[in-house]
Amino acid sequence: MNDQHDCHQILGSLMDYFDGTLPEELCAELEAHLCECQNCQIVVNTTRKTIELYQTAAKEEGAIPAAVRSRLFTRLNLDDYRP
Ligand SMILES: [Zn+2]
C-alpha cells in the first residue's frame, strides 16, 4: 500500500540520495520503498534523468550545486514533498 508519510520522507531525502550523502540505512529504506511505490519510482526516474542532463550540460562531477537543487525541486514539484 502507498503510505503518504513514507513518500514525503523518501522524496525529501532524494537529493541526498543522488548526492551519495544519504546514510546507507536510509538508502536501503528508500530503495525498499521504491520497490513498492510506483509513484516514487516515477519521481526518482525523472529526477535522475534531469540530474544527468544538468551534469552533462555543466560537465560537472560530484555534488549538485544548491541553486540547481532548488530549481530541480521546483521543476519536479517536489516542494510538496519537502520535510
Ligand atoms: Zn512513495
Image (cartoon, helix red, strand yellow):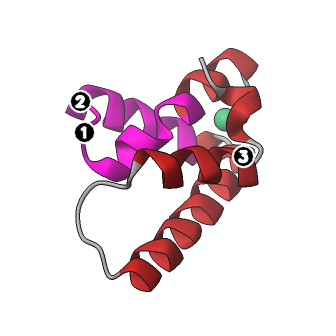
Q: Please state the horizontal and vertical placement of residue 44, each as a whole percent of the image.
A: 58, 54
Percent x, y for residue 38? 71, 50
Q: Give amino acid for label 3.
A: Thr
Residue 71 drawn in magenta: no
User: How many labels sit on residues?
Assistant: 3
Which mark is in front, 3 or 2? Answer: 3
Which is in the foreground here, disc 1 or disc 2? 1
Q: For the residue marked with disc 1, what is the amino acid?
A: Thr
Q: Is residue 62 in sight in this rendering?
A: yes
Q: Mark 1 and mark 3: span between their CA atoms?
A: 21 Å
Which residue is depicted at the point 45% across and 43% down?
Answer: 15
Q: Compute the Cα span from label 1 to label 2.
A: 6 Å
Regarding mark 1 in the picture, which secondary structure is present there? loop
* Secondary structure at numbered mark 3: helix
How packed mark 3 is, by other alpha carbons closer than 10 Å (few <14, some 14-19, many 20 or more), is few
The residue nearer to you, when weighing 23 against 79, is 79
Report which residue position mark 2 lands on. Answer: 23
Which is more toward the observer, 16 or 58?
A: 58
Callout 2: SS: loop
Residue at the image position 67 percent from the left and 42 percent from the top: 37
Query: Which residue bears the numbered disc 3?
Result: 74
Q: Are marks 3 and 2 in contact (CB under 8 Å)?
A: no
Looking at the image, tell me whether mark 3 or mark 2 is earlier in sequence order.
2
Dominant SS type (magenta): helix
Q: Give the range drawn in magenta.
A: 11-34
Residue ID for mark 1: 21
Residue 1 visible in rendering: no
**3, 20: nearer the viewer:** 20
